Amino acid sequence: MPTLDTTALHRWRDGQFTDSYTHLGAHAEGDGTRFTVWAPHADAVAVVGDFNGWSPDANALERAGEGLWSGLVADAAPGARYKYRIQHGGGAFDKTDPYAFQIEPPAEGGSTAEGLASVVTDLSYDWGDSDWMGSREGPGSFQQPVSIYEVHLGSWRHKGHGESLSYREIAEPLADHVEALGFTHVELLPVMEHAYYGSWGYQTLGYFAPTFRYGSPEDFMFLVDTLHQRGIGVILDWAPAHFATDPQGLSHFDGTPLYEPHDERMRTHPDWGTYVFDYGKPGVQNFLLSSARFWLDRYHVDGIRVDAVASMLYLDYSRDEYTPNEHGGRENLHAIRFLQRLNTEAYAHHPEVMMIAEESTAWPGVSQPVYTGGLGFLYKWNMGWMHDTLTFFSEDPVHRKYYHNDLTFPLHYAFSEHFCLPLSHDEVVHGKGSLWGKMPGDDWQKAANLRLLYGHMVGHPGKKLLFMGQEFGQRGEWTHDHPLDWHSAEGGLHAGVQRWTQDVFSLYREHPALHDDEPKGFEWIDFGDRDNSVVSYLRKGEDGKTLLFVLNATPVVRDNYRVGVPRDGVWTERLNSDAETYGGSGVGNHGEVETTPVPYHGRPASLVLTLPPLAALVLELQNEPKATGATTRATSAQKATRKTPKGAKASASRKA
């Protein structure tokens, strides 16, 4: 193990020790283990554990400088449990190692809080993902498809008696499912150790330890390795905005507010009752920057999604009283610099990874480079798109014309940041209901609305994220204690929703026009038909291929609906969310439509379409115009019959 030499101590002092996980914590040294911990205000520190009968007198640590304590224990081998016994102000208390690579489960019959001993751990693993790691795209890969399947490991699927699958047990079925859906990545709700299961991992205790609930560190490596070998990237949720107040954890670690602010007004996060980090302390910077780098270095993860960034940026976030910054402002200058350093460090060592921000305000430059004053993230969650789009889709179709701007307004700022469009876990919990439950109408209309929503999500500029269960229209609100209702996905409308999800996300993955991250890749055809709740737009790829999206957000079949297009030729109906295979009514355009020489919407030619009810049409311009003849031709599996569907209303015409 590297020693704490003068250079290392200076790096720690200056907040530059961004791989401090290589020194702090428990590391093999010769035939023993060296323990190192940051506790600058402690009067004395000892390591207690299985190897010394948990005696505080057996293995005292020595001051190593810069507030660090260190010592070699000859009898501590991998698998041994331990804690730090810290003395301060006449008292003594035990703490879990902040840098622990593994934390034990609770004792049989006891609560998690009664356990939480750290475990000496060897992180050796024989990785099999060299092909994947070698193929990861380099920096700035904005033109690549990114579609993310968000997962809570404990509730994705259960085995008998309500027990969650282990890391190893979930690896193959999760890879099978994600591969079948056509998603490019999995994003895992925090796997970092947490005492309170109901926090979903966001009240973190162990920033270097995958939770014991599903297995060992090696088991988690196996999960990542399996996904990589199946061509699926792995993104981890990470929560540096706040931490759990468990007495064994970081709070008052050395008897004083060490990781948290000394200022009591700024210490507690008002929304969650947790503690916030003091980003101005070099030791805190070392800790958090090392945590992020650790998961990238040692677990081969492909990205980190940073939770609750807005609460980090503003000193007055959810507070009536706060201490202003040195300029009298509300911005958390230390947090800003920390986030910039986080991204700078991540890309310096792993330029091909994705750093993603959940930032819910209009803070400028979240995904702009640090050298321009931005925060340096690659992508930012587009919370405005999520809110406005769900507002529109939650309305009864008869009222949607009054909410038309909620559907179209997000395009005004779609390119102001590099966005990811999230339909995340946050939208299906705490009384919000599932996405299925948000959709108006009977079951047929709910399914149709959901297919339409996903069609628009794929057509809209931005990367994509969908929470587990929504791919088939989970009826119930998500709860971490229960698995998804997989039985409902086996047939009927829910199976149709899942087939649509597979097909529309597979189209996204294969079609470069949908990966485009530039304004020139999107073009409105018509965003003003609010009376009919119809919008149409083009997605254009650098390869010259073009897709036309036409969305009908009412249950009215619209015959002879004219849409202007930029070029004559034959447009193939690539996807129709109303096709019978998806549970729709089968209304469509028989596979192909040929343009007519009628200028419309400011374009030189136009298509006369039949718009299915509550449906998305995706048409692709063919490279060569086909022979003239009938304006519609039957082709492929998208062929649809003409009939009035259940849940739809009588047809309406819009003639040129």
Image (spheres, rainbow, N blue to C red):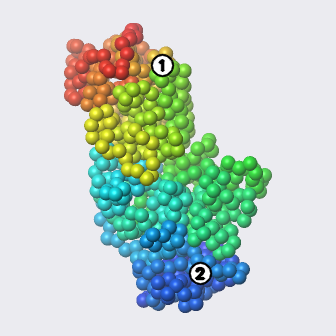
Q: Is residue 478 above or below residue 538?
A: below
Q: Nearer the viewer, residue 632 or 243?
A: 243
- Quick one: SS at disc 1? helix
Instruction: State the residue at coordinates (32%, 70%).
Output: 126
Measuring from the top left, give residue 286's x and y in whole percent. 58, 68
Q: Amino acid at mark 2?
A: Arg
* Residue 40 is at least partly visible in this image: yes
Measuring from the top left, give residue 428's x and y in whole percent. 47, 42
Find the distance from the CA under tag 1 to the CA under tag 2.
Answer: 66 Å
The reply, left or right, for residue 92 in relation to residue 578 is right
Instruction: State the residue at coordinates (67%, 49%).
Output: 317
Q: Using the rendered view, name the quadrant where residue 255 is placed.
A: bottom right
Please give the label number shown on residue 85.
Answer: 2
Q: Using the rendered view, name the quadrant where residue 247 is placed.
A: bottom right
Q: Residue lying furthest front in this view?
A: 109
Q: The C terminus is located in which quarter?
A: top left
Q: Using the rendered view, name the quadrant where residue 574 is placed.
A: top left
Q: Residue lying furthest top in this view?
A: 655
Q: Which residue is mark 1?
A: 398
Q: Earlier in the sequence, mark 1 or mark 2?
A: 2
Instruction: State the residue at coordinates (66%, 67%).
Output: 281
Measuring from the top left, give residue 469's x and y in whole percent. 38, 44
Q: Amino acid at mark 1?
A: Val
The reply, left or right, for residue 189 in relation to residue 330 is left
Say if mark 1 contacts mark 2, CB within 8 Å: no
Instruction: State the residue at coordinates (21%, 25%).
Output: 635
